[in-house]
Image: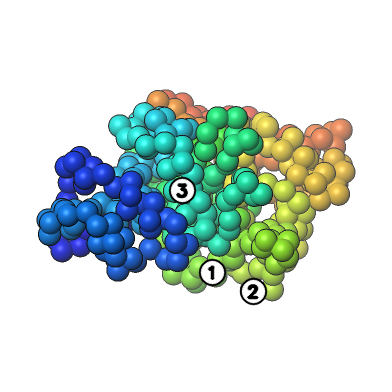
Amino acid sequence: MNGVGRGRRAAPAEARGISLEPFRSAVLSDPSPVTGARLAAAVQSSGRLLGTAGTLQAVDSLSAELRGLGPLQQLAEARVTDILVNGPHDVWTDGEGGLRRAEIAFGSDADVRALAARLVAAGGRRLDDGNPCADVHLAGYRVHAVLPPVSTGGTLLSIRLHRPRRFALAELLVAAPQWQPYLEAIVLQRLNFLICGATGSGKTTMLAAMLGTASPQERMVLVEDAAELNPGHPHVVGLQSRTSNVEGTGAVGMAELVRQALRMRPDRLVVGECRGGEVREFLAAMNTGHAGAGGTIHANSAAAVPARLAAMGALAGMNADSIALQAASALDLVISMQRTDAGRCVQEVCLLQTNDAGRLHTITALAADGAGVRHCHGWDELRGRLFP
C-alpha cells in the first residue's frame, strides 16, 4: 500500500515540484473505491502536461496518499504501535521509544478530515457533521476519529496498528525471564485470570503470548470488541462485536457474544477486554465450569481491579456484594502490567479474594524485584495452585 508497484519507490511528487491538490480533490469528490484506473484518469483529465515520468510520479504519490493510511503510511513501521494526529501539523507516534513527534504534516485540517472520513468509510461507518465520532476496525488497523466541534481543535485521528507477528512468551520476558515459569504454570493449571494495566502497557500482547502456551488440544473462543488477539495456537476462533448501522439496528454487543461463545464448546473462553455489562456473563461462565479463561481490564494496578469490576457489574445491574462473590469465585488471579522506561513488563501477580466484610480485594503473591521476582504474602497459597 505504501509502495508504487513496478518494483520501485518514487519520490513524493510534491517534493519534485508537482502539486497533488488538483488530483487529490478530483479523486476524493467521487465516493467510489480508489483504483489505479481512477488515479490515472484523474491525472490525465487535469490537462496538465507532466510528461510520462511526471504522470507516473503523480499517480504513485496519489496511490500512496489515498490508499492505506495515506501520508501516514510511512509511519507504520515495526516499532510503532499508534499514530496520533492532533492537527495538520501535529502528528505523533507511540512505540518502543514512547511518544515522538513525527516529521510529517498535512496541508490543512481538511486533508486530515478527508483521510479520516475515507478510513471510517472503509470500515462501513460514516464520519460527518451528523456523526462526528467514529471507531472502526480495518485489516491491520483500528481507527478512531473525532470532528469539530466535538473536538475543540481540528480533526483528531488515532490509529492503533495491529501486528500480524505473534510473540512467544519468552520474547516478552527478555528483561525479566524469571517470570516465565510462573506465567506458563498459570496457563497449564487452567487458572482464570485477568491482565490489568493502563493503555499501552502490553495487556493484549501478553494475553496472546500466554494463550500461545496452552495445549494444542484445547479449543479457544475469543470474544473481542475489536479483533486484536493473535495467539500462536492451532485452534482459535474469534467473535467480534458490531455497532449499529445508520438506521440504529444490527448491533451485536459483547454480552451477547459471550453467550454465543458458550454454545461453541470452548475449552478456554477469552474476553479480549472486559469493559462493560458483559462482565456478568463472563463471570457466570467461569463459575459454571469454564476453567482456563482469561481477559484484560483497564486498571492502573491490581489493587484497582475490584473497583473496576464493581463499576462494570453496576452496568449489568449487579450490586457490589453480588459482583464481589461472583468475581472471587470465578477469578483466581490478576496479573498487572506496567509500562516503564525499560519497556512493558509484569509488575505483580495477585490473588483475588473477599475479606471478612465481603469486600473484594487483592493479595500480592509475586512482585517484580528488578529483573527478578519476589515472593510476597500470598505466595504460599498461589504456589499450591501453580505447582500442586
> Residue 199 location in percent, x, y?
54, 37
Dots 1, 2 in contact, CB < 8 A: yes
The amino acid sitting under disc 2 is Met
* Label whose residue precedes the other's in the sequence (3 or 1): 3
Quadrant of the image for the N terminus?
A: bottom left
Q: Which element is circle 3 on?
A: helix
Q: CA distance from mark 3 to mark 1?
A: 35 Å
The amino acid sitting under disc 1 is Val
Q: CA distance from mark 2 to mark 3?
A: 41 Å
Res. 316 in view: yes
Q: Which element is circle 2 on?
A: loop
300 versus 188 height, above or below: above
Q: How many marks?
A: 3
Q: Quadrant of residue 280?
A: bottom right
22 versus 362 height, above or below: below
Q: Which residue is mark 1?
A: 237
Direction from residue 351 to residue 181 in the image, left or right: left
